[in-house]
Image (cartoon, rainbow, N blue to C red):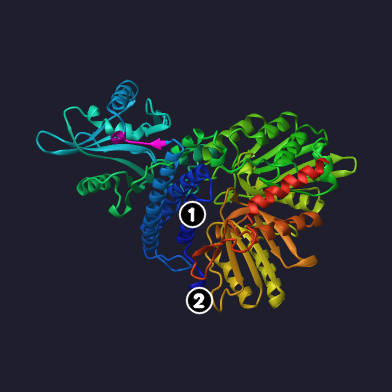
């Protein structure tokens, strides 16, 4: 097949992060929200280096001539192309930072260095440094008798080139404190004026190296590879939870993949640093902006009284489909309920789980847990259920990247309460969002099944768009039970009639449904809402469908390795991406139109890791009201002309602007609708 309709995964992800940066650049976005997007851009980039560049680095060591299956680039070619694009994006980021600092200045907030403050303020800061900083700071001098210190991932260090009497130069390194010191240091007598803690430390380096002359200095920050295969290093002498705790520790010590510097210093010194870190010079970045943008959230806190600098407050609304004054389980037994976060509250699901913990007819609760809130009400209800004598089976995925420590702690608490906890399947993550409540009644066994597109996380339910489907349909409950029975045995299901369950019966079922639309020719229609699209098998099938005349509309927020509108290949495919106030996280699959259309919500993106290497669940939506809501959600997002960008045949994205049309921000529209329907239901 012609590969001109495919895009490299890493470069496509960088296009997504560019769209995040565009939000920071956009003057239509409130100032303090632009600060958030700038910080998110940086944290996204950190993770990209830790995971994707780290993975490519490992691939290059194993087989530098291997090629990825879409654009056939080697690991080295992908790294080179990614780093070139990253440098251009970071240049834009630095310019955006300068602009935002100017805008903050108009609001009375400024970040300064010693050149911009009075001698009195300098004296105050020196006294404070001697009193509060100096006793807590460590110093390292790299020499023959002192080895190069271990530099922690993403921590900031002050680095000095030290001159001696014999004109020999040494390298001095000072950790800038991590969480020991407040990041924003207030300048006395200048309200709203701050200095970053690392700049304070850098300025007073001479006090920390008496007897040396500071020839030059810079701030440095390294990023370490975080791509580690937990199963490949499994130690059978440890239980799996202890093994994952060891994996977390090991990740912190993996090799560096990037060195960031805040100032130019002698190339010979950079070469020495790279030598100690075993890092290529091409992985060194020099910035004009701070190395860590997380302090921007602290600046926001100083401006909370300026409502115009933030998005207007929005709060999740009650669903009109439920009366929360009555038992939720009784209502779900009567009808299916579809919740749409953050527009609607997660509260009904949490209430149902709590009620199940105390319902005498509930005999068991089974759940898959991937990422949880810090103070999880879900865990509280599961603990209560176990303490009330219910059978509680919980699969806690300890391989949820960067949430391992949190999940390890939750698993311990669940076990202490008497829950039966398992930790996933060997060589496979369990990413499904599945909850099954089983009741024993006079009429027989009843199942209440909840299937979602997002995590059981109260915090992200206010920030991410996700769908949560609650149903008492027996056929769904029975198949959910089969999924859990397999998981408890460390296995996966091979056949499902209603649910689509990866790894064995998701991708193949999707191909069958695409074939069904291909058979219709030009009357075929496929609509997809995904976070990412990388599965080449499914992409080739979509190309085939496009060539057969099937109309394909896709909303893909992040990585998209398929290019739309390529003559002869994807002419009937249109792809948009929506990046806005809320992170678009829900997955929707719709095949066909009208009464014959088939609707699904799912935890799975169309990535090979999701379709073939994880346990994922897609659920058919058969309730007519719920189907109509899915149709409405897709239609509104598809018509967005404020936050949407449309993909071009070359893989770039062009932002939609209203022009002569009425501006439509899908996220605002859906929130307005949620408010309106909640108000109508109260009348």
In this view, the residue farthest toward the right is 442
Does 542 appear in magenta?
no
The answer to whether residue 56 is above or below residue 70 is: above
The answer to whether residue 655 is above or below residue 249 is: below
Is residue 281 among what the camera can see? yes
Residue topped by disc 1: 22
- How many numbered marks have been drawn onto this rendered protein structure? 2
In the drawing, what numbered circle is on residue 2? 2
Could you tell me which secondary element the residue under label 2 belongs to? loop
Tell me the CA gap for discs 1 and 2: 32 Å
Please indicate whether residue 101 sits to the left or right of residue 450 in the image: left
The answer to whether residue 249 is above or below residue 73 is: above
Give how far across and how far down residue 162 sits, in percent: 19, 36
Q: If you read the primary sequence from the N terminus, does the residue marked by circle 1 or circle 2 appear first?
A: 2
Give the magenta-colored segment's residue range.
Answer: 110-116
Give how far across and how far down residue 488 sits, in percent: 66, 45
Give how far across and how far down residue 390 sits, in percent: 75, 34
Q: Quadrant of the C terminus?
A: top right
Does 112 appear in magenta?
yes
The answer to whether residue 615 is above or below residue 184 is: below
- Frontmost residue, 29 versus 153: 29
- Frontmost residue, 480 versus 524: 524
Please indicate whether residue 340 sits to the left or right of residue 180 in the image: right
In the drawing, what numbered circle is on residue 610? none
Classify 10 Å Cα crowding around label 2: few (below 14), some (14-19), many (20 and above): few
Q: Nearer the viewer, mark 1 or mark 2?
A: 1
Classify 10 Å Cα crowding around label 1: few (below 14), some (14-19), many (20 and above): many
Instruction: Tell me the residue at 47%/52% (across/down).
Output: 25
Is residue 402 among what the camera can see? no
């Amino acid at each position: 097949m012609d590969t001109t309709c495919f895009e490299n995964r890493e470069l496509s992800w960088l296009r997504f992060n560019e769209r995040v940066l565009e939000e920071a650049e956009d003057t239509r976005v409130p100032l303090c929200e632009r600060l958030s997007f700038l910080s998110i851009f940086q944290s996204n980039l950190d993770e990209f280096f830790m995971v994707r560049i780290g993975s490519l680095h490992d691939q290059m060591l194993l087989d530098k001539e291997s090629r990825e299956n879409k654009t056939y680039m080697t690991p080295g070619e992908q790294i080179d192309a990614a780093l070139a694009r990253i440098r251009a994006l970071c240049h834009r980021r630095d310019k955006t930072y300068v602009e935002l600092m100017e805008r903050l200045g108009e609001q009375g907030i400024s970040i300064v260095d010693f050149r911009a403050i009075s001698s009195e303020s300098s004296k105050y800061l020196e006294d404070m440094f001697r009193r509060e900083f100096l006793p807590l700071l460590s110093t390292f001098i790299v020499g023959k008798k002192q080895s190069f210190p271990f530099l922690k991932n993403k921590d900031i260090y002050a680095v000095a080139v030290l001159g001696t009497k014999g004109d020999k130069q040494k390298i001095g390194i000072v950790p800038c404190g991590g969480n020991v010191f407040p990041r924003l240091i207030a300048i006395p007598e200048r309200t709203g004026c701050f200095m970053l803690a690392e700049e304070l430390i850098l300025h007073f380096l001479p006090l920390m190296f008496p007897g040396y002359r500071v020839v030059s200095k810079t701030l440095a920050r390294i990023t370490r590879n975080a791509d580690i295969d937990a199963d490949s290093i499994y130690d059978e002498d440890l239980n799996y939870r202890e093994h994952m705790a060891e994996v977390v520790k090991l990740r912190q010590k993996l090799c560096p993949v990037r060195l960031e510097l805040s100032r130019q210093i002698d190339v010979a010194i950079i070469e020495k640093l790279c030598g100690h870190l075993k890092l290529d010079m091409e992985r060194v970045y020099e910035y004009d902006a701070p190395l860590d943008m997380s302090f921007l959230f602290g600046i926001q806190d100083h401006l909370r009284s300026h409502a115009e600098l933030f998005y207007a407050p929005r709060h999740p609304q009650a669903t009109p489909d439920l009366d929360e004054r009555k038992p939720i389980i009784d209502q779900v037994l009567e009808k299916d309920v579809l919740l749409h976060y953050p527009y609607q509250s997660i509260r009904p699901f949490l209430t149902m789980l709590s009620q199940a913990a105390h319902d005498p007819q509930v005999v068991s609760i089974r759940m898959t847990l991937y990422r949880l809130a810090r103070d999880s009400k879900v865990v509280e209800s599961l603990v209560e259920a176990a303490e009330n004598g219910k059978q509680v089976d919980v699969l806690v995925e300890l391989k949820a990247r960067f949430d391992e420590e949190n999940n390890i702690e939750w698993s311990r608490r669940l076990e202490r309460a008497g829950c039966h906890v398992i930790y996933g399947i060997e060589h496979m993550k369990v990413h499904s969002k599945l909850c099954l409540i089983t009741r024993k009644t006079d009429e027989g066994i009843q199942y209440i099944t909840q299937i979602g597109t997002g995590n059981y996380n109260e915090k992200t339910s206010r920030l991410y768009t996700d769908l949560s489907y609650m149903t008492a349909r027996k056929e769904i409950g029975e198949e959910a039970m089969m999924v859990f029975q397999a998981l408890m045995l460390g296995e996966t299901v091979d056949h499902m009639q209603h649910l689509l369950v990866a790894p064995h019966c998701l991708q193949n079922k999707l191909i069958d449904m695409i074939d069904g639309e291909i058979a219709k020719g030009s009357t075929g229609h496929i609509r997809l809402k995904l976070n990412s699209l990388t599965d080449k098998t499914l992409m080739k099938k979509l190309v085939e469908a496009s060539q057969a005349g099937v109309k394909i509309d896709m909303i893909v927020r992040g990585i998209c390795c398929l290019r739309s509108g390529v003559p002869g290949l994807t002419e009937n495919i249109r792809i948009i991406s929506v990046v806005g106030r809320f992170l678009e996280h829900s997955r929707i699959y719709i095949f066909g139109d009208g009464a014959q259309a088939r609707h699904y919500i799912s935890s799975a993106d169309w990535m090979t890791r999701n379709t073939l290497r994880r346990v994922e669940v897609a659920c058919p939506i058969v309730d007519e009201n719920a189907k109509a809501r899915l149709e409405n959600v897709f239609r509104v997002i598809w018509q967005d002309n404020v936050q949407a960008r449309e993909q071009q045949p070359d893989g770039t994205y062009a932002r939609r602007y209203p022009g002569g049309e009425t501006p439509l921000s899908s996220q605002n529209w859906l929130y307005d609708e949620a408010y309106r329907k909640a108000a109508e239901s109260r009348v």
